[in-house]
Image (spheres, rainbow, N blue to C red):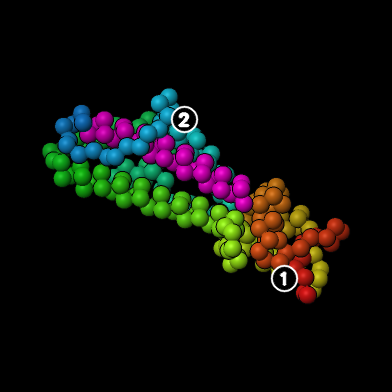
Amino acid sequence: MIDFRRTIADARTAWENAHAILCKDVNKVLREVGANVRLPVRRAPAKLDFKTAIFHLEAAIHRLKNFAVIPSDQPWLVLGNNPYPMDDAAGPEWYLQRLARVNVDDQFWRREIVEPMQRHAEAVRKWLARMSKEAGHDSVAGVHTPPPLTRLEKAVLNIIKVQPKDKGITGNKIIAELARQRITTEQSTLTRHIIPKLKRWYGVKNRPGVGYYISSK
């Protein structure tokens, strides 16, 4: 599960960097409009711009989807209570400046912008931490309880389970059956990540010329 852990770590870093730059941009506007509230900002690479940070985050999320089911409507970044569109790399200035034209006070900025972004950041960090714990579950000494499966892993295990007694199914046929169920994955993801986990924890075996199966013994 090293690749899963690395993927989670990359996603966390990419998200923290994008979130930090967004918070920094929000604070800049809050300062310009005379508001006395600020978002906490974690350090991001000095030469990293928002557009590049968004690109890295999108790439990390794409890789993460090989291991975990991510709701399509899950916002990774927010501006106040609203999802921040990651295809809008121009920054939040236009939206905040429009709000600033209204006669608003510090309580407004705190309630509508700062606090919602802080709550969202905490929720994302907890989700990533939970995923990281799952990824490292099978590497902890003395742990014998099978780690939870993602939706993709469960689908693969179920395909193998329904094969006739002591009969196997090849990787190509698993991919084809997943496609029939409208689930897509790469052959490399199946053989390098999913099958090793199922072999270690769920009794899946492999025999040349037979394929993947679960022994009846």
Where does residue 128 sit, x and y in percent of width and height? 46, 50
Give the answer, above or below, for where 184 lies relative to 44: below
- Judge by depth and name the residue closer to the eye, 127 or 200: 200
> At 42% across and 29% down in the image, what residue appears?
45
What's the residue type where badge 2 is placed? Thr
Residue 169 in view: no
Q: How many marks?
A: 2
> At 42% across and 46% down in the image, what residue appears?
76
Give the answer, above or below, for where 33 lies relative to 216: above
Residue 43 in view: yes
In the rendered structure, the answer to whether residue 192 lies left or right of residue 15 reads right
Where does residue 143 sit, x and y in percent of width and height? 58, 63
Residue corresponding to mark 1: 162
What's the residue type where badge 1 is placed? Val
Residue corresponding to mark 2: 52
Magenta span main SS:
helix
Where does residue 177 sit, x and y in percent of width and height? 71, 60
Q: Residue furthest front?
A: 142
- Residue 122 falls inside the magenta stretch: no
> At 66% across and 58% down in the image, what residue appears?
197
SS for dot 1: loop
> At 20% across and 39% down in the image, what residue appears?
37
Where does residue 180 sit, x and y in percent of width and height? 68, 59
Tell me which label, 1 or 2, sits earlier in the chain. Answer: 2
Q: Which residues are magenta?
A: 1-30
Give the answer, above or below, for where 100 lies relative to 142: above
